[in-house]
Each structure stands twice: as structure tokens, then as C-alpha cells.
Image (spheres, rainbow, N blue to C red):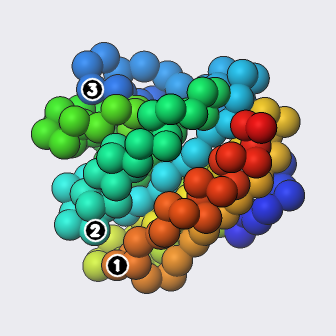
């Protein structure tokens, strides 16, 4: 499983910010700052919806330059489009439909609610050198992270 201090090799996933479907490459964003990956099991599930809306409402993220947030699940970009539009999410959602990235990071459940290989609920913050600076992972998909620790890490990275 990925942990603080590890290096994340570049990856590319299809995603959407709500309109068009594009390819998102990690290095495009870490070249100019930090990236927060928000891994979650499914669009529209109650806990996932609450968690992503908490990111939407986190004012400190809106005012932090050079920090990009990306949600990642197995859902297709078409579901992501609808999810973004319904909840007015201001960040892209990426599709890891085959689980290649979440498997590589060691962040997949063997099985959750009769679905195999869905992403664990996790946060991974990567700095401009592709080094992991913060991780939060739970075995319980019903548990949500506190954004306070994440906020403290981001303040250190951007200062």
C-alpha cells in the first residue's frame, strides 16, 4: 500500500470536470504544485456523496493556489458527469474502470458490497516531486476522513 515518502510514477486516466471527457495526466498537475487524490467506491453512494461535497465546501481549498483535487472511482465518466452536475463539484472526477491505478497503489477492496476491486476510501497528497506527503486510508468504506489533517499538510506543502 502506498505510504508517505513513496514516489508515485506518472499515470493518465480519463475524466471529466462535468462537460467534456479528457485525459488527465498526473505530471501535468504536479509540475506546478500538489495534487490531492480522493479515492472513493461509487458516485451517488451516500457516504461518497457526503465526502465529495465536504471537499466542495472546504473553503481553504478554494483559496489555495497550486493544489488540484481529483476524485477517483471505478465509475465511468458518464456517471461522473451527472454526479458533478447534480452536486456542483468544482474538481474533476477520474475513471479507473479497470482498477489499474488503485491496484498499483494498493488501495482496492478485495470485495465491498458484492463488488470486487473497488477503490478504498482514501486520500493521497502528492507534492511537486511526485512524493506522497500525506495518506489516509480506511478499511471501512463507511468512514470519512477529517479534512483538518489534510489541511495542515497542504499548508506545509504550499509554504
Residue 107 is at least partly visible in this image: no
Tally of numbered discs: 3
In which quadrant is the N terminus drawn?
bottom right
- Up-down: is 22 above or below 146? above
**Number of other residues with Cα within 10 Å of mark 2, as a class: few under 14, some 14 to 19, many 20 or more:** some
- Helix, strand or loop at label 3? It is loop
Relative placement, left or right, of 156 versus 86 is right
- Up-down: is 89 above or below 50? above
Q: Which is nearer the eye, 127 or 152?
A: 152
Label 2 close to label 1 by CB (< 8 Å): yes
Question: Where does label 2 land, which residue?
Answer: 47
Reading the chain from its start, which is encountered first: label 3 or label 2?
A: 3
Question: Where does label 3 land, which residue?
Answer: 18
Please name the residue shown 50% across and 61% down the image. 147
Q: Give the alpha-carbon distance from disc 2 to disc 1, as whole Å.
A: 6 Å
Q: Which is nearer the eye, 122 or 33?
A: 33
Q: Residue 142's mark?
A: 1
Label 3 close to label 1 by CB (< 8 Å): no
Reading the chain from its start, which is encountered first: label 3 or label 1?
A: 3
Amino acid at each position: 500500500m502506498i505510504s508517505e515518502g513513496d514516489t508515485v510514477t506518472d499515470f493518465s486516466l480519463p475524466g471529466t470536470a462535468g462537460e467534456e471527457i479528457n485525459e488527465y495526466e498526473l505530471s501535468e498537475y504536479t509540475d506546478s504544485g500538489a495534487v490531492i487524490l480522493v479515492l472513493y467506491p461509487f458516485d451517488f453512494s451516500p457516504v461518497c456523496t457526503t465526502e465529495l461535497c465536504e471537499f466542495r465546501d472546504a473553503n481553504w481549498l478554494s483559496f489555495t493556489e497550486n493544489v488540484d483535487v481529483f476524485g477517483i472511482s471505478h465509475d465511468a465518466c458518464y456517471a461522473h458527469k451527472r454526479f458533478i452536475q447534480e452536486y456542483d463539484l468544482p474538481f474533476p472526477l477520474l475513471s479507473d474502470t479497470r482498477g489499474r491505478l488503485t491496484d498499483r497503489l494498493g488501495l482496492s477492496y478485495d470485495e465491498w458490497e458484492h463488488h470486487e476491486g473497488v477503490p478504498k476510501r482514501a486520500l493521497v497528497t502528492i507534492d511537486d516531486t511526485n512524493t506522497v506527503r500525506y495518506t489516509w486510508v480506511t478499511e471501512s468504506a463507511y468512514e470519512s476522513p477529517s479534512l483538518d489533517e489534510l489541511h495542515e499538510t497542504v499548508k506545509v506543502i504550499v509554504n
